[in-house]
Image (cartoon, rainbow, N blue to C red):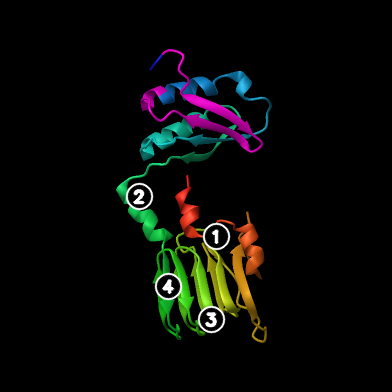
Amino acid sequence: MIANQQLITVKGTRDGLILKVDDHCAYQDVLNELKEKLSVNDLIEDDRLITVNLQLGNRYVTREQKDELKEVVRKSQNLVVGKVESNVITKEEAADWKKHAQVKPLVKVVRSGQVINVEGDLLLIGDVNPGGKIMASGNIFVMGSLRGIAHAGMEGDSHAVIAASFMQPTQLRIGDAISRAPDQDAEGVYMECGYLEKGKDKILIDRLQEVIKKRPDISSFERRMFNG
């Protein structure tokens, strides 16, 4: 390492600290400077918890190295890890990302007893009849009537949503949360969207336009691209 060369730039924001890491030097040099910078007392002004986001640029780090960087941050007083962001991923990670980021279009009616299960977002042009079930690892969009069961974010994605032209489901599931079935004589609603309220496990129903304001990254593609 060149003497006095700064490998980590610290930037303070109202949301916490951003540590921008030089992506040309050796990993061990980065690790050593991170320990040194986080040991400086004037980096922490008070007793409140501060979120630290690490930006690695065009540097690839293994899972073990990422965990090591997180552990250095956690050992520092009042610091919690936010994101560890890198522009570089492996071929396997890229293939998995593409698989989950894709939108699967289907044109059909899902009848009683039928189950549709896709990776990524599901765009169904057709109805889901009572007794039919649709599942997706991402979001679910139904251009038709949803009267059966829909399970979005089935691999634990609590940010997934379920939208339908006509919403009268027997059950909605997002991640691990399950909504109760509506009353038998309850009327369905048009152009509505189900989503999980932040920090809670209750599924709410609102107009699609309103949900987009709360979920600006409603596309699985954008959400997974920057997932740290």
CB within 8 Å, label 3 to label 1: no
Q: Which residues are magenta?
A: 3-29
Q: Quadrant of residue 78?
A: top right
Residue identified by numbered label 1 = 218
How far separated are the C-alphas under marks 2 and 1? Answer: 21 Å
How far separated are the C-alphas under marks 3 and 2? Answer: 34 Å
- Where residue 103 sits in the image (x, y, percent)? 43, 66
Give the amino acid at mark 2: Glu
Residue identified by numbered label 2 = 93
**Which secondary structure, mark 3?**
strand
Give the amino acid at mark 3: Gly
The residue positioned 46% from the left and 53% from the top of the image is 224
How far separated are the C-alphas under marks 1 and 4? Answer: 17 Å
**Which secondary structure, mark 1?**
loop
Question: Which numbered disc, 2 or 4, marks the residue closer to the eye?
Answer: 4
CB within 8 Å, label 3 to label 4: no
Q: Is residue 69 magenta?
A: no
Q: Is residue 142 above or below residue 222?
A: below
**Which secondary structure, mark 2?**
helix
- Where residue 153 sits in the image (x, y, percent)? 49, 63
Residue identified by numbered label 4 = 105
